[in-house]
Amino acid sequence: MSDAKILFGKDNGFEYRIPSIVNANGVLVAAADNGRSGMDWGYIEVCVRRSFDGGETWSEPRTVAAPPARSVSGDEENTKSAFFIDPCMAVAPNGDIVMLVTFFPESKGVHNMKYLEKKKIAFTRFDGIKCPIVYDRDGNYFIVLDNGAVIDKGKAKTAYNLKGIGELYKGEEYVGNIYLNGAQGKSDGETETTFGAPLKSPKRSYIFLLKSSDNGETWSEPVDITPHILREDDGAFIGVSPGCGLTTETGRMLIPLYTENGTVCIYSDNNGESWLRNHRIPYTGNKDEWTMIEAPDGRIYGYGRDDGKIPATISFDHGITWAKSDRPPIKSPKCQKSALVMGDKVLLSHPSGKERSNGVISIGEFSYDKRNRFRGIKWTEEEIEVNRSFFAYSCLVKIDDKTFGILYENKPSGEIVFKKYEI
């Protein structure tokens, strides 16, 4: 075991949460929420650090996704900002890093659901393509075309045009951001603030995607993929399950999501260029964050975050349909978990105390019959102790055949550390 290294610490007034880490062609890329108040709302960016030596040294933190905001401050009640939250990364077969992240317009997100507009339609189909809808103060709707042009309900072109993350223009004049309300705010730092636009996007969650084709050095601008994966009965919330997605031996990328009605899986067979979605997973006993691993015969196991014994599910068709699976004999408080395969072992990181504390990595083993046919996972009583203090969200990463790392929250809303282990 290596000593713990603080990758994201409470400095310069920043608060860090929600770790995600991948090994991209030998480069470790770690991501986290970078907020100002430690709350799950307010001004929250996504930042990354990279390591070229297996986690011994790291680059400085760098922002890859920044939300529009009317105000940037450390005030816990400051809601005058849109925000990104809960990154989940996976490495595509072509080597690209794909990151999905949840995005909310100015609000408290799921922490005050009454402000989310459950009945307001966010997307409509126009010329065979699902397009975003925005509304004026009188409730009139407008459609945003794929090129950013805005048309009215009569399909007539308006003077409006949308760019970037919600930046609305009227001709050449910038007129505000569709994800914000009110008048121009003030910043307590160098972060640029803006103001609300005359047209607004519905208050709900959105799923944005970023890509890096150079092992995390540069990233694409966040793109909203919500219209391609949203179903009408999802309500006003669909969110990313933070941590890591899964790229199977067949080259399929799987990303775990969840809604108010249950867990969801989306998948891509073309390096994240387009995404399909399965039906809900009805047997997890879980409506929250979850993680998955692939077994040697191609079946996929999923593990949720509920209290007590961990809810589990299984897929025999590469993530399209799912069924109930035996729960691991592991107890954990309600918290996000991370799973990783190392050879014939399955690692599952989680808190083991009555609350979020005493971090451990439970160990399972792939089992086979006498003909060497895969039978399932046998969970052992062996555990790797990570720490004996606060332990919340975590993410496991394979470094090489003998070494893995764990990135985990070591303090509430303030510190994310990295450790390495040999197995």
Image (cartoon, helix red, strand yellow):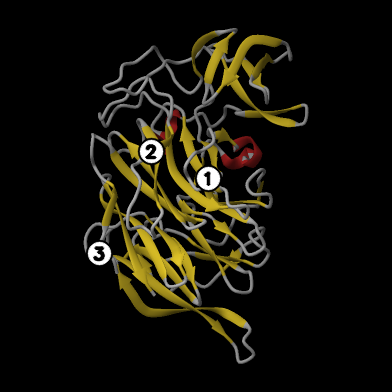
* Amino acid type indicated by mark 3: Asn
Q: Which residue does the image show at 53% across and 26% down from the upper left? A: 202
Residue 136 has which mark?
none
Mark 2 residue element: strand
Q: Which residue is mark 2?
A: 62
Name the image quarter holding residue 74.
top left
Rendered-image quadrant of the C terminus: bottom left
- Judge by depth and name the residue closer to the eye, 116 or 347: 347
Q: Which residue is mark 1?
A: 214
Whole-number angstrom distance, CA of label 1 to CA of label 2: 15 Å
Whole-number angstrom distance, CA of label 3 to CA of label 2: 28 Å
Q: Which residue is mark 3?
A: 387
How far across and down, in percent of the image, does residue 336 sit?
A: 40, 56
Q: Is residue 74 left or right of residue 180?
A: left
> In this rendering, is residue 217 above or below 285?
above
Q: Nearer the viewer, mark 3 or mark 2?
A: 2
Whole-number angstrom distance, CA of label 1 to CA of label 3: 34 Å
| Residue found at the very far bottom of the displayed protein | 370
Name the image quarter holding residue 347.
bottom left
Mark 1 residue element: loop
- Judge by depth and name the residue closer to the eye, 112 or 384: 384
Q: Of marks 1 and 3, which one's residue comes earlier in the chain?
A: 1
Q: Residues within 10 Å of mark 3 (few under 14, many from 20)?
A: some
Q: Nearer the viewer, mark 1 or mark 2?
A: 1
Mark 3 residue element: loop
> In this rendering, is residue 174 above or below 148?
above
* Amino acid type indicated by mark 1: Asp
How far across and down, in percent of the image, does residue 149 sit?
A: 66, 17
* Amino acid type indicated by mark 2: Arg
